[in-house]
Image: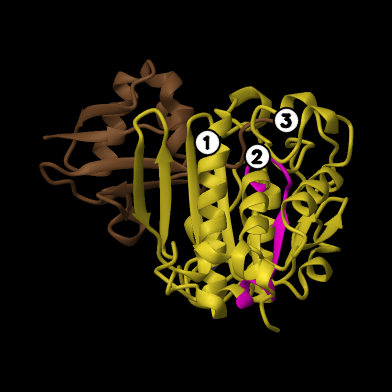
């Protein structure tokens, strides 16, 4: 099943500047795995060595934080939208 | 305090609003807002809050005006180059509205001076451009129980979150700790569309006024994200985390922290 994944600005370099990507997967973990296959390097930006989501990045399924669902094992349904949102601080000095 | 005839005229478009009225306007005039960073976010926020008649505006910024600031820091002008930002901002505010008292803090906010600076203010508006400052300000707001309006911008996107300590999710409930240096592009390497600062800074000012007036629904427990390239505002829900290191059930952060992270040397975007 394919879902829409919204890519935050800092990661668009890795996705050829695409802001939305259709990706396969039944859970967030599977979607991230497929993202890494298609856009190498994106995985390590999102998860740490132990496979956990980095602490300054959140993932939302339809505006709900996956931390308050089943984390990376949160299931995805047809039509769901996945947003990756990192902390941002400033623009330019 | 009674409004003078000039004040009734100056604030007439506010007074016409049932949600503000004479009572709300007097409340604004007796309110105190601390703006940290007189940069991209702080500039529009300070100007609108001054125009709105917020009686006392504190401004914290250690920097002088640089030519590269003027693309977005609209409280400063070309003639202000090399002047302290707090002085430049104070002058513009005085010219805009003599009802406003400006208190300036021409130095960096640190763990050592933050509590003293914030004492006496009703609301904190975060106009800084770096993670150490943002986490320090969040922790300060939680520890001193001051409402905080957080804002951040990068390239073509912005984020805003209002924090009512003890009631709603704080910035650390959302993001537990600052990213390591280099993990998220900031500052000079990334760039920012100047006008984004205006969009996000004015939303922050709006939230601050709503807090003072106790009107409307605040941007609490929701992070508003704005993407200028697609002209999309999208809120995501934020929950107060019982495991939050600063506002959770068993806080592990009980003192303010100065993070040792190389970041922009310039507070205020
Ligand atoms: Zn918290």
Element carrying mark 1: helix
Q: Earlier in the sequence, mark 1 or mark 2?
A: 2
Q: Which mark is residue B40?
A: 2
Separation of marks 1 and 2 at Cα, in angstroms:
9 Å
Separation of marks 3 and 1 at Cα, in angstroms:
14 Å
Q: Is residue A40 left or right of residue A33?
A: right
Instruction: Give the residue drawn at x 30%, y 32%.
Output: A33
Q: Is residue A64 visible?
A: yes
Q: Is residue B217 left or right of residue B94?
A: left
> What hue does chain A carry in this figure?
brown
The chain ID associated with circle 1 is B
> What hue does chain B carry in this figure?
yellow
Instruction: Give the residue drawn at x 76%, y 75%.
Output: B120
Mark 2, Cα crowd under 10 Å, few <14 / some 14-19 / many 20+, is many
Q: Nearer the viewer, residue B230 or B43?
A: B43
Mark 2 Cβ and ligand 1 under 8 Å apart: no
User: In the rendered image, which residue does mark 3 sit on?
Assistant: B69
Instruction: Give the residue drawn at x 42%, y 74%.
Output: B18
User: In the rendered image, which residue does mark 1 sit on?
Assistant: B196
In the rendered image, the vertical position of residue A65 relative to residue B27, given as above or below: above
Q: Is residue B164 visible?
A: no
Separation of marks 3 and 2 at Cα, in angstroms:
8 Å
* Residue B258 on the magenta segment: no
């Amino acid at each position: 099943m394919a879902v829409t994944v919204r890519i935050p600005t800092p990661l668009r370099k890795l996705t050829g500047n695409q802001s939305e990507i259709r990706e396969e997967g039944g859970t967030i973990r599977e979607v991230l795995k497929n993202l890494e296959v298609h856009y190498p390097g994106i995985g390590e930006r999102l998860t740490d060595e132990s496979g956990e989501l980095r602490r300054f990045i959140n993932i939302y399924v339809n505006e709900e934080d996956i931390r308050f669902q089943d984390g990376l094992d949160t299931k995805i349904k047809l039509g769901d939208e996945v947003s990756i949102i990192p902390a941002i601080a400033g623009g330019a000095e | 305090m009674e409004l003078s005839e000039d004040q009734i005229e100056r604030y007439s478009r506010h007074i016409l609003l049932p949600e503000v009225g004479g009572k709300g306007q007097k409340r604004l005039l007796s309110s105190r807002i601390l703006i940290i960073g007189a940069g991209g976010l702080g500039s529009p926020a300070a100007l609108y809050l001054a125009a709105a008649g917020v009686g006392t505006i504190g401004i914290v910024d250690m920097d002088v005006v640089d030519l590269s600031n003027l693309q977005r820091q609209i409280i400063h002008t070309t003639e202000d180059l090399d002047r302290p930002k707090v002085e430049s901002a104070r002058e513009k505010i005085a010219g805009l509205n003599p009802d406003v008292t400006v208190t300036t803090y021409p130095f960096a906010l640190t763990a050592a001076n933050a509590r003293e600076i914030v004492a006496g203010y009703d609301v904190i508006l975060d106009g800084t451009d770096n993670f150490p400052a943002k986490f320090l300000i969040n922790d300060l707001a939680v520890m001193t129980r001051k409402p905080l309006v957080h804002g951040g911008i990068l390239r073509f996107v912005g984020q805003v979150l209002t924090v009512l300590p003890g009631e709603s999710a704080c910035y650390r409930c959302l993001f537990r700790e600052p990213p390591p240096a280099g993990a998220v592009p900031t500052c000079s390497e990334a760039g920012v569309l100047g006008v984004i600062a205006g969009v996000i800074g004015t939303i922050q000012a709006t939230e601050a006024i709503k807090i003072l007036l106790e009107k409307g629904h605040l941007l609490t427990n929701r992070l508003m994200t704005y993407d200028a390239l697609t002209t999309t505002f999208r809120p995501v829900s934020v929950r107060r985390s019982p495991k939050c290191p600063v506002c959770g059930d068993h806080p592990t952060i009980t003192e303010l922290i100065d993070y040792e992270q190389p970041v922009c040397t310039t507070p205020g975007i």
